[in-house]
Amino acid sequence: MSHFYAVALLAFTAGWCLCAADVGDFTSCLQFFYRSWPPKGLAGTPICQRYFNQYRFATLYSRPRRSPWFSAYVYGAPEGKRPKASWKFEPQLTYPGADGNMIPFPPGPLDQNVVESQAVDPDYINSTFSRGHLNPSLHHHTREDRYSTFTLTNVVPQKAGSNDGPWENLEQYVNKTLEDYCLGKAYIVTGIIPYKEDDHWLKNHRVAVPEYLWSAYCCPNYNNSLPERLKGAFPTYAAIGRNDRNSTEEIVPVSQTAKKQFRGYDVRKMPLATLEMYLKNRFNTVVSVFYEQCSSD
Ligand SMILES: *[C@@H]1O[C@H](CO)[C@@H](O)[C@H](O)[C@H]1NC(C)=O
Ligand SMILES: *[C@@H]1O[C@H](CO)[C@@H](O)[C@H](O)[C@H]1NC(C)=O
Ligand SMILES: *[C@@H]1O[C@H](CO)[C@@H](O)[C@H](O)[C@H]1NC(C)=O
Ligand SMILES: *[C@@H]1O[C@H](CO)[C@@H](O)[C@H](O)[C@H]1NC(C)=O
């Protein structure tokens, strides 16, 4: 058998297209989606995020943008401090035979096949953006689950004014709300909204920068005696955050009283239906985040 046919056969049996469009599907990690139903309407490369031989969460990755469309996970009550973890990558994005575990970037020169297939440390070094987790380590209980969020396929270029300010406040608000009033599992999906036209990129034009981040949770089994301020926050609620000070204010208005370093990076909380309306407008297609809008239990 010639080398070409061996590769073609391997590609075929692994369900991998020679155009390198995809590495698989979400079959192995449907447990991270409410009712095993991944969001509909967005196209990309599914990654079942695996660390130490266990699936931890799921990501829909964009190869051309070298960054994710969304990550989906089950909330876990955090314990202890944010870990200091090493950054990891996904070998299977370039080597279809890899076992699917994420691994830390090795010291020394980078494998050019890996560099081609995904974002790498030097993309972020010396850029004016921080590494914004979609699935944050704050929303997980075990050390391994927390470490596993430090993979660059779970990260987008995020302005520090958002990452260290209003977006972090949102992550903390979600933690508090779910820990205090969610009685069963909470499913969270966090994603991005691209610029309408003229994508923005990190300095070397490899990694696309989002204009907004969004997030939504689904907690079907919750405590009914909600305080007034949380009426409407269950079973599902959502938010959109600005990642660009210069954006117009139709989607998220800017507070003039915010601290200077956070001004323009506001987060607006909203019902799931409102988020889905904005997603539909920007993606020009219906986007459904949760099965039957998380209303069917
Ligand atoms: C970052 O900038 C420093 C100082 O200009 C430079 O020495 C270094 O090579 C740069 N690193 C990367 C990865 O671009
Ligand atoms: C998460 O929320 C709980 C409940 O309100 C709170 O006690 C805890 O400190 C929060 N954890 C973090 C890391 O903020
Ligand atoms: C529901 O919330 C109320 C008010 O905060 C609290 O007293 C009650 O113990 C909670 N019930 C459950 C099952 O957690
Ligand atoms: C926002 O606009 C200012 C002034 O026009 C410009 O200097 C800055 O680079 C812009 N920021 C972004 C993120 O585009």
Image (cartoon, grey):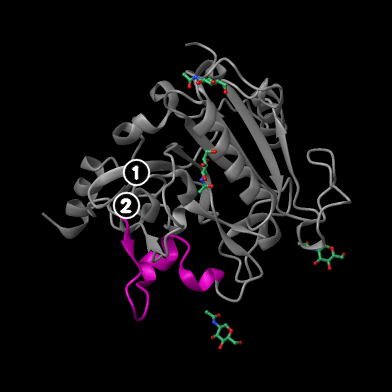
Q: Do the residues labelled 1 and 2 touch (CB within 8 Å)?
A: yes
* Span of residues in magenta: 102-124
Kindly identify which residue carries mark 1: 56
Of all residues shown, which one is farthest toward the left?
1
Q: Is mark 2 within 8 Å of ligand 2?
A: no
Q: Name the residue: 22% across, 56% down.
A: 4
Tell which circle, 1 or 2, labels the residue nearer the N-terminal end. Answer: 1
Q: Name the residue: 35% across, 30% down.
A: 30
Residue 45, image x, y percentages: 43, 44
In which quadrant will I find the N terminus?
bottom left
Kindly identify which residue carries mark 2: 144
SS for dot 1: strand
Residue 98 sits above or below residue 172 on the image: below
Q: Is residue 166 magenta?
A: no
| Location of residue 115 (image quadrant) | bottom left
Residue 11, image x, y percentages: 25, 47
Residue type at mark 2 is Glu
